[in-house]
Image: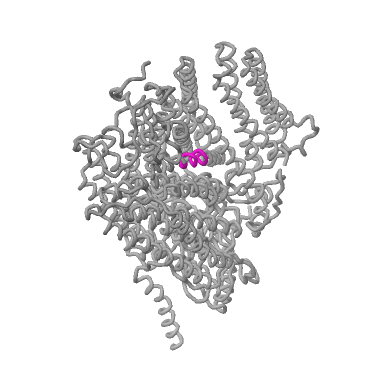
Amino acid sequence: MGDHHHGPAKGLSRWLFTTNHKDIGTMYLWFSFAMFILGGTFAMIIRAELFQPGMQLVEPGFFNQMTTLHGLVMVFGAIMPSFVGLANWLIPMMIGAPDMALPRMNNWSFWILPPGFLMLASTLFMEGGAPAFGWTFYAPLSTTYAAPSVTFFIFAIHVLGISSIMGSINIIATIMNMRAPGMTYMKMPLFVWTWFITAFLLVAVMPVLAGAVTMMLMDIHFGTSFFSAAGGGDPVLFQHIFWFFGHPEVYIIILPAFGVVSQVIPAFSRKPLFGYASMVYATAAIAILSFVVWAHHMYTVGMPVAGELFFMYATMLIAVPTGVKVFNWVSTMWRGSLSFETPMLFSIGFLVLFTIGGFTGLMLSIAPADFQYHDTYFVVAHFHYVMVAGAVFSMTSAVYFWLPKWTGRMYNETMGKVHFWISFVGFNVTFFPQHFVGLAGMPRRVPDYALQFADFNMMSSIGAFVYGASQIMFLYNVIATIVSGEKVSDEQVWDGAEGLEWTLPTPAPYHTFEVPPKIEATPAHG
Amino acid sequence: MAATEHAPAGYEKYHVPDSSSLAVRATVGLILTVFGAGLLLNDMTFGETHESGNAKWVLAAGLVFFIFTLASWFRTTIRENMQGMNSAQLNHSYVLGMFWFIFSEVMFFFAFFGTLFYVRQLAGPWLAGEGDGGRMNGLLWPGFEFSWPPTITPQEAVGGTDIQPIANNGAFLTQERSMSFADAHHWYQWLPMWNTIILLSSSFTVHVAHTALLKDQRSKFNLWLGITVALGIIFVGLQAAEYYEAYVLFGLTLNSGIYGSTFFMLTGFHGFHVFMGMTMLLIQLLRSVRGHHFTASDHFGFEASSWYWHFVDVVWVFLFLFVYIL
Amino acid sequence: MSIKKSLVTAGAALSALPIVALAQNQVNMSPGVTKVGAEIYDLHMLIMIICIVIGVGVFGVMLYSIVYHRKSKGFVASQFHESTKVEIAWTVVPFLILIGMAVPATSTLLEVYDNDDAELDILVTGHQWKWRYEYLNAEGENVSFFSNLATPQEEIYNSEAKGEHYLLEVDEPLVIPVDTKVRFLITANDVIHSWWVPEIAVKRDAIPGFINEAWSKVDQEGIYRGQCTELCGSYHGFMPIVVHAVSQDEFQGWMSAKRADKDAQIAASSVDLSLDALMTEGESVYKTQCLACHGGQGEGGVGKAISGSSIAMGDLGLHLDVGIKGVAGTAMQAFGEQLTDVEMAAVITYQRNAFGNNTGDVVQPSDVAQHKQG
């Protein structure tokens, strides 16, 4: 039982049985990319059907299955696991720990994900088809009126909830318990901080989601009436529970993205992050506020006006800490010595587009105006600016930023830049016109639309195909780097990068910080 | 921020376990379990009556496999600890893990308590046409009056399943008697009160056991832990008796509208957690009696189980208050 | 003649208005034809302009940095990393701006929620996938009807050219009087729907088992179109809303005509029809009511197959039961109230004789009426 095995095991068993945070991180990243491609395929089917008015390719019922699976796969399969993968790779290296706190459980958190999603995807081939009630699965469309496959959908949600809870408990334990001596909380890199707060959010809300789907299961199979008015329940109750999970979930997705950008922008500005402490407080404030704003997704359900006002004011408040973050990032760039490698491009892309998403978010928070925006393409545009240009751009930035440290090889910079510009243009061509059709009155989740929306929808579809295709270039670039990229000679990789992970050899050895590093007394961020 | 490779004085190595098949085995068990459960439920609800699938065997195989894997997982961690591989820092990771696991359980119950408050304070009165959220609902449910425990479901108020077409997934028939104190014939026949007494005393007995262990009084520890487990078993037994009473004598079922739904889900999940906690404590008792595990300074397996036990106890207090009394 | 001609011209001009609006691609919210709608529009513009101004400022600073503070230009980074004053300022100033936004937002919201003193109540019920309207407090008997998508399947499946109001046209629109506070009592029969007509500034979810209130006071006569805005199943995209806002006189006339219609329907149900007449009528009812779920050839889809079905070829009583009362817990609704006895008789006859079912059964309106009475 020696624990001094310096290399990984060989073959498949390395990946199946591993307890190594880097292996597990790698698996999370590849799995999430596979899900990104799968969810992207669903999106392409959606956009192809919406290319022109009229039904051309799929039936309306199947269209709904596509929108549902697209949302579920992207949120739970692509974005969340990708950031967990990043956390696995980076948190131990950033805080000077030998591994995650509970390595075997870490492996389990990952391995229940693929079969969980296999179960979800298998519903496509079941009688009655896959879930077709949207990723928000509002009852009673998802209970009394759902296809039998909903049972497997419910269990899939349970499984990936278990995965998330275990993963986040691991992250909390790692950060609280595994920091190298001298690595105080206020010296932790911002990526670690944002994940710390995200993990708390996950532990707090994933069980609530489990509760919601359990109630659905009981309504479907055991005749309870949680979401049925006839028995004294309320369909809107489902929405309250769902969004009590769902709104923090949105921040679960975006906070680690904030963390990445807060590492990348200072590195390529060659200047410390502006307002480190206020960044930490702003992140915490956003997380706390996220528990009291859930019903802003439900302005039109007929809440009493007092509730409506409370949720409107609380939601508007979120603009303050979010604004602080944006101002801090811009100030970090101000009077820096900027260079524009691919990670920086994606982070600047994030900053611009996420801010636009934030503005539309503020507009949506205004309850009376939301009566006109709600459930239109304006909302679709808003959350894709936050989810794609926010989370996915930041994730892409992270991959380009740390890939040389992980693999010891440099990616193709030109191809990276081309990838960015095609993504940036493709993304905006896809989603900017959706603001217009939404304001003009096009509801979301419709397989067909009136003629006045035709031009913008065609534009949107063309943009989507371009954006989708550009991800193949990303995949190629990453694989080419791993296989035959130019070796990185400099341990530091990026001259402006700060943090413990850059003090390690390149590529990062299989085991790092088996003996904790000593952190110098000088504050890390000043 | 430069790092230098010097182990600080007194540093104990953090044990990163070897690669292990436990996680993959547990995954197989878990996935078979949920897949089997899904098949079974769908056969039950949507299946043709003459069909008898293999669902129950898939479920059973999954459960057995899962439970055995978990057992061997815990055995592995116990062995590692006994072999002295765990540093204080590693033990602290287990402490944090257990603490945040219990926190996640708290949030799970929070969802069901939230549901209870929502239907009692908001949805119920709204359905009866009261309050800001439902002043026009009288049009849909004429004659429905809301009270708690409810004496009638909206569906019954308008004349049953045939009359109301809304979200019609069955007949919601109110119970004849509820489980609240007001409906009990005699105070000494009111099981929830006895259950409260039993569970509260079990929290006390497990604390006595812990104190004994801290003083290294092995037989006293075994005795009080044994009493705790016994109280847990009695609680689960009484809960079963209460369910029998509800289903058979009071006509209170899962189909009894929202009262039955919230009652059975809250008490049911709590009962399941009591069963889990009781099993955990039983295993600790067996470890102590047969394996002479635990010392005054090293007994995390017991400590974690006792935290869990206190947690189910606290949940019960809230249940007693909001489900049975208020 | 000249009166008629000018009416036609006025009508054409009126109906041309939306076309002019649609000819260009609309890129912004419509202020609509109500006071509340205009206030919402103003609020929307106010917030958007504030956001744009802030955005220009932030992006301007960033762009300046990107252009001038470049490593490639030899710009040396300064190392400042905090400034308490600035940080406090950009926390407090946005907070004040938000208060400035909250004030008009609150007053508009309170107005939206002022559902009292309505002059006309209309119960709006969402069904999969059509709307039902019932006029509640008009004098005399309540008038109610269903409003179905009128766009033919041929247009949806691209075998015919799409009409101007593709997917936004119904067989029977909701008619409301102008300059009248109309309250909509919105609910649903099966799943959650949402009733939205942008130009009269009403969107409210239709929750099964609960009634939500919303109101509108339309200033201009005209035709206003909207759609269901909550995912409600396969044909969520195919349940439009059309509102005709007419003068109060015209509204009264329409109301009397509807009542007369109802009497005529009752009279019609006692007259027997020929198989051919029933089949013709049945086919058209089938197309609007049944086809979406049961398929163009009765082959089934969301619903069961009708071609060769044991119900459509078996006991007539059971067939009538399913048609009139629906099947609980499925998408098969109770059509007893949605169709007149003549329509029900026709569609049942059609189902029993089309798609190769050829039972030869003829169901008369009187049979339906009799069956309803039990």
In x, y percent, where is residue A200?
A: 49, 40
Q: Report the label total.
A: 0
Determine the residue positioned at 71% across, 43% down: B149
- Please state, as top left, top right, bottom left or bottom right, where the N terminus of chain B lies in the image: top left
Q: Is residue A504 above or below residue C327?
A: above
Q: Looking at the rendering, in which quadrant would you find the C terminus of chain B?
A: top right
The image quarter containing residue A524 is top left
Which one is nearer the viewer's eye here, C161 or A427? A427
Q: Nearer the viewer, residue A422 or B29?
A: A422
Residue C146, image x, y percentages: 52, 62
Q: Is residue A23 left or right of residue B276?
A: left
Q: Residue at x 69, y 26 (%)?
A: B238
Outermost bottom residue: C2
Magenta stretch, residue numbers: A197-206
User: What secondary structure is the stretch in magenta mostly built from?
Assistant: helix
Residue C205 visible? The answer is no
Task: Look at the image and say whether residue C151 sits in the magenta stretch.
Answer: no
